[in-house]
Amino acid sequence: MAAAADLNAALSDLIARFGGSHDVDVSVSYGSSGTFYAQLLNQAPFDLFLSADVDYPNQLAARGLTLPQSEFTYAIGRLALWAPASSPLDLEREGLQALTQASVAHIAIANPAHAPYGRAAVAAMRSAGVYERAQPKLVLGENVAQAMQFVQSGAADAGLVAMALTVAPNVKGKGRLFEVPASSYPRLEQGGTILKWAADVDAARALRGFLLSADGQAILKQYGLSLPGR
Amino acid sequence: MDWRAIWLSVRLAAATTVVLLALGIPLAYWIVFSRRRWKFLVESIVALPLVLPPTVLGFYVLVAIGPLSPVGRAYARIAGHGLPFTFEGLLIASVLYSMPFAVQPFAAEFASVDRRLLEASWSLGVSRLETFRRVVIPLSVRGLVTGIVLSFAHTLGEFGVVLMVGGNLPGVTRTVSISIYDAVQSLDYAAASRTSLLLLIVSFLILASTYSLQRSVWLKARR
């Protein structure tokens, strides 16, 4: 299956649990949703597509490339401001205002031209009134995971990334974190779909079912990804 | 058409070529004429970018020039700003990435110069440097041109390394290949295909003119 880059940590957990109860080998490709969309338009051999928004699956459906009525929403993404633990920025107290400090040279976000988390980051900075001053400092990752990598490597001072990536086991506790208020950016509804040419439709359906089940949602919730009210 | 990205790529390719000319000629000379036993190690390092994925190179360069490395910190102290996401940072990455495309043709051509001509020059009391300037270089024009053109063309088409270290800044690190990628990602296939076509034509013209030059009489006559 093809999965948005913010799912990287959550899905490996989820698939391990899924594999325990199903006799299916799941292999995942992570990337930006826009890339996968372009590939799927050309019939990339994926069975299941988990996007970071709902538009891409819906557009695929509109073009008749998906199994009828197979679109689903599996999570609401959350945006976080993250910096390494060694950072002098007091993100927890100052939030997005910290980005206007002179010591901040580079702010990493996903490319807003095609990554949903990038668009959310820009919207959040606009609502906080810091976009004008932050804009010259922006560096764009190809997807949200690369934006995270820019910050982790120290090349960027802070990043607006997916909450799901900041709570991954290899990152958790190694940074300073501010959760951006959900009201300051458009809802990051993450949707998926099963492709028309899926090689194993039953397995894809089973995985979709698991994602939406109480067990699946419980795992997603650990990564700040679950659907509200579940 | 993203002219800003095209102009940036041309500037990056030109700067990379100039640096590689300055670094590559002494390095190729050393590889050809040194008697050190371990010179195969240097040759291997120079050739590494041919086999290494650009992502590996890009990742290492990003970490190496970032504020967590001594090199990155030293540069930031001197220049007042860090190297990542700057033109200079991209230039360093491009020089490493295109190194074999300059050094290998240079070295191959230096090695093919008739040894007897060099020994004749040396035995007439002409210094090694002077011999290199007056005998080796004029006999190696073809290899030098090939190296220059390949470095330029290879940098023009660079993608993975730029993606890893660039940060996609318009006019600074958004090169033409990144611009095309962005256009595809944003589903703007018309813009992507316009720029791609231009790049295809330019690359073909560069290579065609080089290969035709290699066949031409004035270069051959000197051999």
Image: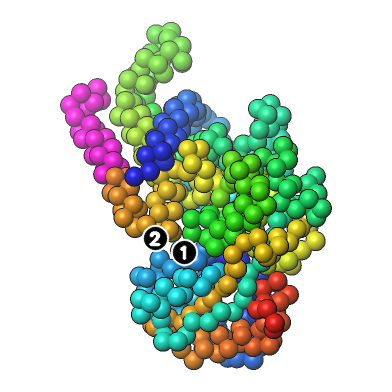
- The quadrant where residue A76 appears: bottom right
SS at mark 1 in the image: helix
Give x and y (percent) for residue B61.
Answer: 59, 44
Mark 1–mark 2 CB contact (< 8 Å): yes
Residue type pointed to by label 1: Gly
Name the residue tied to disc 1.
Answer: A34
- Magenta region: B200-223
Give x and y (percent) for residue B165.
Answer: 56, 46
Q: Is residue B154 above or below residue B143?
A: below
Whole-Å distance between the Cαs marked 1 and 2?
8 Å
Q: Is residue B217 magenta?
A: yes
Front one among B62 and A197: A197
Q: Is residue B149 magenta?
A: no
Give x and y (percent) for residue A129.
Answer: 66, 48
Name the residue tied to disc 2.
Answer: B187
SS at mark 2 in the image: loop
The C terminus of chain A lies in which quarter of the figure?
A: bottom right
Residue type pointed to by label 2: Leu
Give x and y (percent) for residue B190.
Answer: 31, 55
Q: Residue at the spot x=25%, y=39% of the render?
A: B205
Residue found farthest to the left: B217
Would residue B58 be seen by someone viewing this image from the given angle?
no
Q: Residue at the spot x=46%, y=15% of the render?
A: B129
